[in-house]
Amino acid sequence: MAETRDLLLEMFHAAVRAADPMLCVPPCLPEPAKDGRTIVVGAGKASAVMAQATEAHWGKNYPGHELEGVVVTRYGYAVPCSKIKILEASHPVPDEKGMAAAQEILEAVSGLTEKDLVICLISGGGSALLTVPAGDMTLADKQAVNKALLASGATIDEMNCIRKHLSKIKGGQLAAACAPAKVISILISDVPGDDPQVIASGPTVPDDTTFAEAMRLVRHYDMDLPAAAMAILDAGVQETPKPGDPIFENTEIRMAAAPRLSLNAAADVARKAGIAPLILGDSLEGESREVGTVLAGIAQSARAHGTPVAAPAVLLSGGETTVTLRGKGRGGPNAECVLGMALALDGQAGLSALCCDTDGIDGSEDNAGAMIDPGTLDRARDKGVDAAAYLRNNDAYGFFQAVDGLVITGPTKTNVNDFRAILIEPSKG
């Protein structure tokens, strides 16, 4: 089992390395502004390392050009920079430091001219870190909205639709604040489909969602939002900038890293180990435990019948699953996904799996995710741990802590969404 565990971890680490900002950001950087200022702003779990990569590239290639700016990242994700100010704030629920950082970013890009250049470094997690509440909303209102969204079971696209319409900076509004300066947005994608509108709620790109759509989603998921938030959505004034708006004429998007590239890196590790990789997709969504059940079924088919791939093989997938909170336990979408998978597999021989978030933090816990092997449920039973009861209580963290199945890496300072690998060994006999 040790060799299986090591291989699964090796594939995960390869996926993370493929999204290392120090490697993927420099090729995307533009030349400095010729006659104006070059300002760097940004937000997200990878934004501090993206800023560090930008400074290193600038110092090597443009030593005579000044660079300034400010980015905000999650607590514990800061790295040293000399020209770009690095701020930290709370994620996934925003706090006062996030509000202050977002205001500082808006101030950094105010009063620019067409001669100036803004480099906007955006990665997953930026939505919670860029907090400028709309209307009469307070920080407490914004925190209540985020908690309601995270517990609703809504997809990331749906959550961001609502977030954009309760913000003064998301959904293209940061680009509006930068105009008429040139804006180059460098993105590390953590969302299914790599849609720039969805990554960190699209602060520098047009938004084709509407207030009406946001209100429909609130009602569909029966969200209990604060009165101030409901008033904004109901009034539906000051729509986010839409495609075709002149403020986007001088903007450009450059994708530095995305889930597919990380899955390809993991596939290369598998091939070198003599194992056939099959990438099921980089944008799998759905309820975490249900996705785990479906993936278990595919793995069982592969081992029993050689379809959709013959063993030895590994099924790889990315995307972002969601959790509808029913219990009061500790957990995250990746741990819950692999716990659902474990229950569906019920100790079947020859099948092991890892589900982890590439940012190193599964939800709000200290683990990246968790791993299972054919003996996971037996070890749980020996300790009197009821896997199904833990799942009902949304306590996947507690379950894997009890059976030594947690994967703890610490913050990776990048983020290309969830990573899932199911290793399939050949049947014996």
Image (cartoon, rainbow, N blue to C red):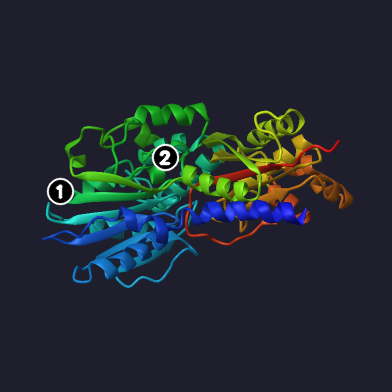
Q: Nearer the viewer, residue 323 or 142?
A: 323
Percent x, y of residue 78? 44, 66
> Is 160 placed left or right of 367 in the picture?
left
- Mark 2: secondary structure: helix
**For marks 2 and 1 on the same chain, the one whose residue lies earlier in the sequence:** 1
Q: Nearer the viewer, residue 260 or 73?
A: 260
The amino acid on which the numbered mark 1 sits, given as a three-letter code, is Pro
> Is 208 placed left or right of 2 in the picture?
left
Which quarter of the rendering shows the C terminus?
top right
Question: Which of the numbered marks, if any, corresponds to residue 232?
Answer: none
Q: Residue at x 47, y 49 (%)?
A: 143
Distance from the alpha carbon under mark 2 to that under mark 1: 26 Å
Percent x, y of residue 104? 29, 60
In this picture, is 177 found above or below 165?
Answer: below
Question: Which of the numbered marks, if any, corresponds to residue 180?
Answer: 1
> Is 8 placed left or right of 130 in the picture?
right
Dot 2 alpha-carbon crowd within 10 angstroms: few under 14, some 14 to 19, many 20 or more: many
Percent x, y of residue 90? 47, 58
Judging by the rendered image, the residue that carries numbered circle 2 is 194
> Is 341 placed left or right of 383 in the picture?
left
